[in-house]
Image (cartoon, rainbow, N blue to C red):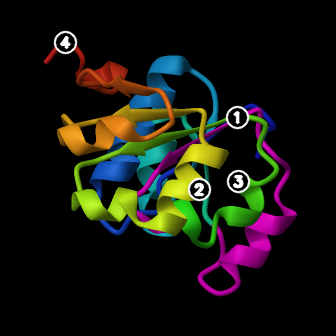
Amino acid sequence: MSAGILYYARGGGHGHVLRGLAVLSRLGRGTLLGPLAHAPWAAALGVAYVSPPAAGAREWFAGCPAPALLVVDVFPRGVVGELTPLLERAPAAWLVARRVREDYYLHAPVRAALESRYERVLWCETPPPVLAGLAVPATPLPLVLPREYASV
């Protein structure tokens, strides 16, 4: 795993990993961290891929080198969960956020993590107006496709 961009996409569905593959294949650099089952997709696109062990993930993250930029694409595991040891050491972290219940992002521990550990929230969907009060810059994301599908 390089010390450059680390894109964390351990969500249970395919959306997080596909978005990470699209972003990193367009950038041409970085490492995607996701479920082991999706590693063949990364290999097909030439994207570096790692998967933490099924047990002891928090400890595994504690031992990882801090990336220059940690992009966290979760729903909502890594905001206050297993990723915390790495998140605390990363010099820069961005959250790729999806629309969930508004009160989730406003829940005290989640809000505190967002406002103290992340320098930017990238919204895949329009957030509800109540979340405009979060003390972290927000940026809406356009549709992103892997290079191979950009002309389809």
Mark drawn on residue 151: 4
Task: Kindly indicate whether the residue at mark 1 contacts the one at mark 3 (C-beta within 8 angstroms).
Answer: no
Do callouts 2 and 3 mark residues in contact (Cβ within 8 Å)? yes
Residue 49 vs residue 144: left or right?
right
Residue 34 vertical placement versus 132 (above, below): below
Tell me the CA gap for discs 3 and 1.
Answer: 9 Å
Asked if the stretch drawn in magenta spans residue 152, the answer is no
Question: Any mark on residue 113, and which?
Answer: 2
Magenta part of the protein: which range? Answer: 52-77
Give the x, y percent position of residue 120: 52, 31
Q: Nearer the viewer, mark 2 or mark 4?
A: 2
Q: Kindly indicate whether the residue at mark 1 contacts the one at mark 2 (C-beta within 8 angstroms).
A: no
C-alpha span from label 2 to label 1: 13 Å
Residue 33 visible in the current orientation:
no
| Element on which disc 4 rests | loop
What's under tag 2, amino acid-wise? Ala
Where residue 40 sits: x, y (%)?
45, 54
| In contact (CB < 8 Å): disc 2 and disc 4 | no
The residue tagged 3 is: 87
Specify the label residue 49 is tagged with: none
Other-residue count near label 4 (Cα within 10 Å), few / some / many at <14 / 14–19 / ≥20: few
Which mark is drawn over residue 92? 1
Q: Measuring 31% from the left and 22% from the top, which residue is drawn there? A: 148
Question: CA separation, marks 1 and 4?
Answer: 32 Å
**Circle 3: element type:** helix
Q: CA distance from mark 3 to mark 4?
A: 36 Å
**Crowd around label 3: few <14 · some 14–19 · many ≥20 (10 Å):** many
Judge whether 8 appears above or below 120 on screen.
below
Q: Horizontal and vertical percent for residue 76?
A: 40, 63
Q: Earlier in the sequence, mark 2 or mark 4?
A: 2
